[in-house]
Image (spheres, rainbow, N blue to C red):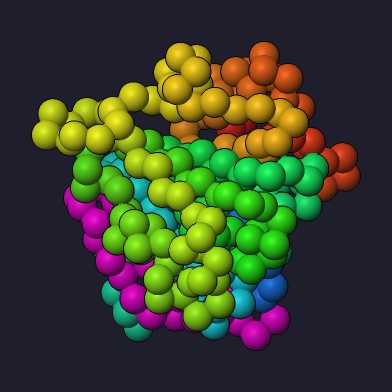
Amino acid sequence: MAFSTVKVLTTHHWNKGLFSFSVSRPASFRFVSGQFVMIGLMVNGKPLMRAYSMASPFWDESLEFLSIIVPDGPLTSQLCKIQPGDEILLGAKPTGTLTLDALLPGKRLHLIGTGTGLAPWLSIIRDPEAYERYEKITVQHTVRQVEDLAFRDVLESQLADDPLVADEAKQKLIYDASVTKCPTWTGENRRITQRIESGDYPLDPEFDRVMLCGSMAMIKETGALLESLGFTEGAQSQPGTYVLERAFVG
């Protein structure tokens, strides 16, 4: 696998099991909003790499990622210790199916994710093209605890500080958070599959387009629900009405 060495610029720990970090971006590195790349560390003299979605916009001079921390995980148990100035490995070739070109034209875009499945949505909602294609864009993020709502302030502000899409996001971006395991949370507390099944999160394949990223269970269950509603899975070679990232499903 071809990879380069990049320098860590920033780190932020959201809680004991979740952190984000940014790294320098090689001049030759190009990606499409929603794609992922392999990143990692040298462990016991060998590169240990995992797939991570870019959470930064395609035009940014740095690359940002969102990661869980698995205490005994071979990679994340070490990756969570990085500090600005350290170096990590970055794969040379970004890829992935969560791109706007994999969807047929529609009116509303639903970016549905659990946990770190939020990452590709952070890239897509800062892409001006997304707002040219859709009248409304909803970021639907389901987590267990309130502290798992990474980038909540940024999303609640509708990207107020974004240099390219702040005006469009103010009119078109909707942040829909659901916290399932926190008794003090007063907002939505159901999983997205429950909301779709009950009809409280209505989706119409004629007008709605959906992207899925997160836990394997959520992706498979929600994908099956969408199929039952008449949605068809898309790809860049044959666009459809919903897409998912199979690299994280297996």
Q: Is residue 205 visible?
A: yes
Residue at 64%, 22% (x, y): give it: 226
Residue at 51%, 39% (x, y): give it: 112
Where 159 sits versus 145, above or below?
A: below
Where 194 sits versus 239, above or below?
A: above
Please state the horizontal and vertical placement of residue 95, each as a whole percent of the image. Answer: 70, 55
Quarter of the image with the C terminus in it: top right
Region rendered in magenta: 1-28
Q: Is residue 19 visible?
A: no
- Residue 244 in the magenta stretch? The answer is no
Q: Quadrant of residue 240?
A: top right
Q: Please indicate whether residue 140 sits to the left or right of residue 187 in the image.
A: right
How many numbered marks have been drawn onto this rendered protein structure?
0
- Residue 27 in the magenta stretch? The answer is yes
Q: Nearer the viewer, residue 54 or 171?
A: 171
Q: Nearer the viewer, residue 250 or 138?
A: 138
Quarter of the image with the N terminus in it: bottom right
Please state the horizontal and vertical placement of residue 165, each as a whole percent of the image. Answer: 54, 71
Please state the horizontal and vertical placement of residue 176, each as a whole percent of the image. Answer: 40, 42
Residue at 70%, 36% (x, y): give it: 207
Main structural element of the magenta stretch: helix, strand or loop? strand
Given the current orientation, which residue lies at the most extreme right position? 237
Q: Quadrant of residue 206?
A: top right
Q: Quadrant of residue 33?
A: bottom right
